Image: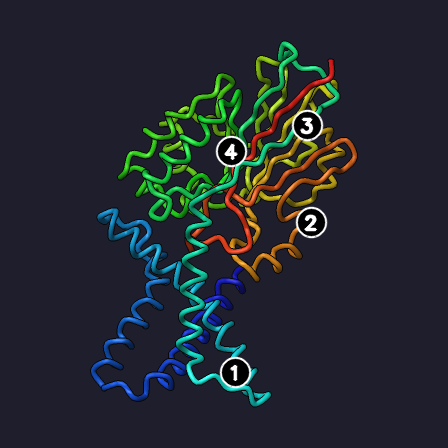
Amino acid sequence: MLSFFIILPILYLAGNVYIFWRGRQALKSQSTGVKVLLSIIFWGGAFSFFSSFLFRNLNMPASLAQTISQVGTGWLVFTLYMVLALVVFDLLRLFHIRCKHSFHLSLFLTLSLLGYGNYHYQHPDTKVINMVINKPADTDGQPLRVVAISDVHLGYATNKAMLEGYVDLINAERPDLVIISGDLIDNSVVPLHHEQMEEELSRIYAPLGIYMVPGNHEYISGIEESEKFIAKTPIVLLRDSVITLPNQIQLVGRDDRHNRGRKTLEQLTENLDPSKPVILLDHQPYELEKTEKAGVDLQFSGHTHRGQVWPISWIVDRMFELSHGIKKIGNSTIYVSSGLSLWGPPFRIGTDSEIVVFQLTFEN
């Protein structure tokens, strides 16, 4: 993990140097004043990526903080696609195929793609999954409607206005139960308190309750501070704990891998009634073969975002046994969500933001 936080900034800065060098070539006919102005704007955008992390715990005007966050993290994806486009044109030159305006065309294509990605991100899908669990539950013969979300990342980027829209989408599904598989909070609880986001979270209505487990970002934000914020909402935080709902469904909430001392899945489930349904919330989808051995009927996870944008999605698909979607292992069904919102860059390119609705039918 440490090597990732060293390699990423190096690659990011190298990519920006490459874009800047190619930009200077394309703008060599411009006046010195224009070049200086564009250079200041360019490097201001590039270094705002680091500012978005350094200033995350400062209490600043929400509009300024949101601008710094979205420009800073958005520049990361801008750099990715500009480098990819420019490299393609440079490779074409090796085959004596030249494009006179390659920089300008790369810029146009990148900005167009980012525009699409931002629009796609702001229009999440709702995925309905019908499931039969071969165990009894007291649901009066009616399907149980469970709305499942993960990776909302509330903060400067996903603000109160966006949260209001998400709550409306959740309530529109008329859930019996709402489950949240971690990373409700982004990098700091400061903007959540500042915008009083607990007011919107308190509008979520589900007769059987709202339950969540921590993700790695609850730890990044400070797990104690995260717990204090969540306590202001109707959400019940499960950290290595099990509850049995009134309908006899056993809900297992596993703490995040950031807690090195968390219980094993075997320890968490050893006292469960194997004849009754078991739903597991575990933020990070690792060691999925243990899910079936523990007698879990449905596991809901998140964390991966499925990479958020292509081609990062290709890498993430190879990092995880299941980076997104549904998988059956024995009698267990595992679903990994690509997330309702995002960390950082406000773009979805080749992936979806989603709400998952499980319609569960139980065999008595």
Q: What residue type is labelled 3?
A: Met
Q: Is any atom of residue 261 visible in this view?
A: no
**Residue drawn at the location 32% of the way across and 72% of the way down:** 43
Q: How many labels does the image show?
A: 4
* Residue beneath disc 3: 131
* Residue beneath disc 1: 90
Q: Is any atom of residue 193 visible in this view?
A: yes
The label number, if any, that marks residue 180 in the structure image: 4
C-alpha distance separating marks 1 and 4: 45 Å
**Residue drawn at the location 42% of the way across and 53% of the way down:** 118
Mark toward the start of the polypeptide (2 vs 4): 4
Determine crowd level at label 1: few under 14, some 14-19, many 20+ residues with C-alpha closer than 10 A. some
Mark toward the start of the polypeptide (2 vs 1): 1
Q: Which of marks 4 and 3 is in front?
A: 3
Q: Which one is in front, 77 or 97?
A: 97
Determine crowd level at label 4: few under 14, some 14-19, many 20+ residues with C-alpha closer than 10 A. many
Q: Which amino acid does label 1 sit on?
A: Asp
Mark toward the start of the polypeptide (1 vs 4): 1
Mark 4 residue element: strand
Determine crowd level at label 2: few under 14, some 14-19, many 20+ residues with C-alpha closer than 10 A. some
The x and y percentages for residue 85 are: 49, 73
Q: In this view, does 292 lie above or below 312?
A: above
